[in-house]
Amino acid sequence: MLRQCVFTILNIYAPSKIFGGQFYMKGNLPLEVAETTLGDAGSFSLAWTFMGHSYFYVLFVGILNLLELGFRYGIKQIY
């Protein structure tokens, strides 16, 4: 039961990276992040903005998460 819950949560988490739900994507920055100077920016905002700058990087990380999900929680292990 716990394994199925983790599988479901990770199945939601990984595609959210690909479709722009996790990182601050280029052209879709929140106003408070866009107006923050570099010296005032927090580490979280810097990391999420950097990671979301390249869509190919976001796609790569999202696909890796989906592959990990498939290898770690394969169909045979779920049931």
Image (spheres, rainbow, N blue to C red):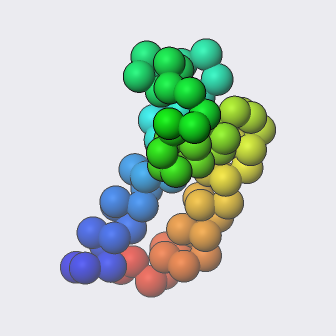
**61 versus 69 height, above or below:** above
Instruction: Report whether 10 appears left or right of 47.
Output: left
Extreme-bottom residue of the structure: 77
Instruction: Report whether 50 appears left or right of 7.
Output: right
- Residue 17 visible (yes or no): no
Q: Nearer the viewer, residue 35 or 59?
A: 35
The residue drawn where x is 54% and y is 79% is: 72
The residue drawn where x is 57% and y is 37% is: 39
Q: Nearer the viewer, residue 48 or 42?
A: 42
The residue drawn where x is 66% and y is 41% is: 50
Give the percent coordinates (x, y) of residue 13: 43, 52
**71 versus 60 height, above or below:** below
Instruction: Report whether 19 appears left or right of 59.
Output: left
In which quadrant of the rendered image does the N terminus lie?
bottom left
In which quadrant of the rendered image does the C terminus lie?
bottom left
- Residue 28 visible (yes or no): yes
Extreme-left residue of the structure: 1
Give the percent coordinates (x, y) of residue 43: 52, 51
Give the percent coordinates (x, y) of residue 20: 53, 32
- How many numbered callouts? 0
The residue drawn where x is 61% and y is 76% is: 71
Extreme-front residue of the structure: 39
Give the percent coordinates (x, y) of residue 58: 67, 43
